[in-house]
Amino acid sequence: MITRQLKINDFLKYGILAPVVIWLMLFLVIPYFNLLMYSFWKNGPFAIEHTPTFENYIRFFSLKKGSGAPLWVLFDTFRIALIVTVCAVIISYPLAYFINFGIKNAKYKKMFYMLAVIPLWISYVMKAYSWTIILGTHGLLNSFLIWLHITEKPMEVFLYNDFSVIIAMVNIYVPFVLMPLYTSLEQIPRNLIEASEDLGCNPARTFFKVVFPLSLPGVITGATYAFTLSMGDFLAPQLLGGATSSTKIANIVQMQFGTSNNWPYGAAIGVVILVLILVLLALTGKVEKHFSKLDAEEGK
Amino acid sequence: MKKTLFCAFALTAGLVLLNGCKGKAVGTAAVDWNKIDFKGEQLNLLTWEQYADKTFVEPFEKKYNCKINATFFASGDDLLAKIKAGGGSTYDIISPSGDMAGYLVDAGMLEPIDTTHISAWNDIPETFKRNDVVKGTDIYGVPYLWGPDYVMYNADVIKKPIESWNELWDPQYVGRLALHDDISNIYMIGKMLGRDAADGQALYNMSDADLAYAKDKLSTLNKSIRKYWSNGGELENLFKNKEVDIAVGWPSTLKNLQDQGMNMKWCIPKEGCTGWFDRLMIVKGSQHVQLATLWIDWCTSAQGEALGSIATTFSVSNPKAADYLNADQKKIAMVDEMYQFFKSINFWSYVKNREAYNDTWTEVKTSK
């Protein structure tokens, strides 16, 4: 009887696990393993040569004189991703705070939250392209500035440079930061805030001593989303970048699988980015855990 | 004895039957190809974006009761990547330019074409049939449309034609230029250096020193570039939104902009220009070789080429297409001066050291 019960339990346990494991194997483990294998192969004149080599990695890390070294492109992408992340957090935080604490009516709260998240339903390309209409030489922004007499002639500085790439990415990734941030703010027990006020803290002190530290896990999760997504973004730079700002590290990877047609080299760069992101995730995970622990201790 | 006789009879009967089946297969070849009903069979094109215009796709679909699906590629390497990923099970017809055609033949990625079924084969001038797509007695590509990579400009803003490629570096054009996001810009530098004076192929086989020079020269042009365009539609939008005034591009873009009322003009700088010659080819392992052959036959026929040229403004390789073009269309596609025009263009060829060209191009685009 006990063994039969065990069998059913086993069946349930493995039965539930099996689809997940199969899914992960098929769409995560095998593709990544494949990527890793490719990165050690060599691009032949007609086909990929299956002879192990470190050539692709050496090529990536060799610092060529002057521009164009992919490693520098990686640093540049890192810089852009960092700016995007900071901007996205700066925009998302007050927004999430306002929706959480500024709106008392639960119905409106939900509505505002939906409004902030709705851009996720719009196609990426459409969002990116609409920025060309806004930022273009004869776009909305320039027309507005001319109307205000701030400028006489339309300015070209808004579009086709790092600025437009960053603006579009911030616009696209704000909901990704907002969601975890909102959740973490929502979970802060209201009595902690009341207690802080009772103990004589002014709103600013309450915010910095109570609300902000407790929302940090949300900030970290959101920032990680924004950072990883903008590190891997190749569409925004391609559509909105100019002569020298349209090539980020993901574009170089994409080029290897398209125009340059060097899959092993593309795979090697992919692996480098992957490792970088994994290290980053491990770090942020640790920081997040640290703050969650504080949470739990304070909760005691 | 009876048994042996029976066996012999059975064997003969079997052979006859087998032959019969074979005969039937051969028989289809003998059938008039023009009258075959393909019963909704699908033909998959992987072509430049202009080569699936409904003006010539629809009559073909109707005639053979088939369906044409088109996927587009943005550059020769893009085409290669797509064939490598998909192959004959995904695509039947491709239209590579000269930079990729020979490579595809060498790599064994194509089916030979039975030119006896290409009715225009003998009408196509021999000068257009380049031997990079011939291997032994097999022919892998049929000449289709061709044209230059010339300078086009918004004549409302730019009052005089660009006479030399060097003028693109003129400070007055800072931020007003668009070039193709492609290694063909390196050929342009080769052209400016006059490297092809003695040997036309030299542009596709430039030395390391020349490539380094091209990198520096193109990098200094970056500040004049508003955007590197990656497809014709993107370039069109750049002109329409008045983001650029001058570009190096294809005649089809120029025509579309003119059709929309823009005052667009084109010119070929005195150093000459490069250009492309597209051949239609069948991908190895294609499941619809017969239908694909018919498609090539239709596209390269006098009427098919005329429709192609009207849709794209590209030049034709079948001179008889002139019969289907009016005076204006002939002028746009330079049909009357086609041989002279052909001679003035250095057509893209396979670049052996493609990696070095690609690297140079990436370096240009990431130079700060």
Image (cartoon, coloured by chain):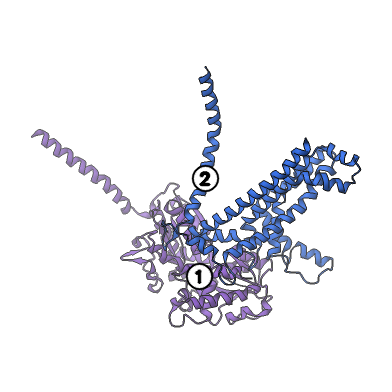
Task: For marks 2 and 1, give the one nearer the viewer.
Answer: 2
Quadrant in the picture for the C terminus of chain A: top right
Disc 1 is placed on an element classified as helix
Residue situated in front as seen by the camera: A266 or A157 = A266
* Residue A58 place in picture, x, y as percent: 51, 63
* Residue B155 place in picture, x, y as percent: 66, 76
Q: Which mark is residue A29?
A: 2
Can you tell which chain is drawn purple? Answer: B
* Residue A180 place in picture, x, y as percent: 72, 44
Q: Which mark is residue A147?
A: none
Vertical order, A25 against B53 (above or below): above
* Residue B130 place in picture, x, y as percent: 39, 71
Identified at 35% across, 60% down, the residue is B112
Q: Which mark is residue B357?
A: 1
Vertical order, B51 against B190 (above or below): above
The answer, for residue B222, to whether it is visible in the render is yes
User: Label 1 lies in what chain?
Assistant: B
Q: Tag 2: residue type?
A: Val
Can you tell which chain is drawn blue? Answer: A
Q: Tag 1: residue type?
A: Tyr
Disc 2 is placed on an element classified as helix
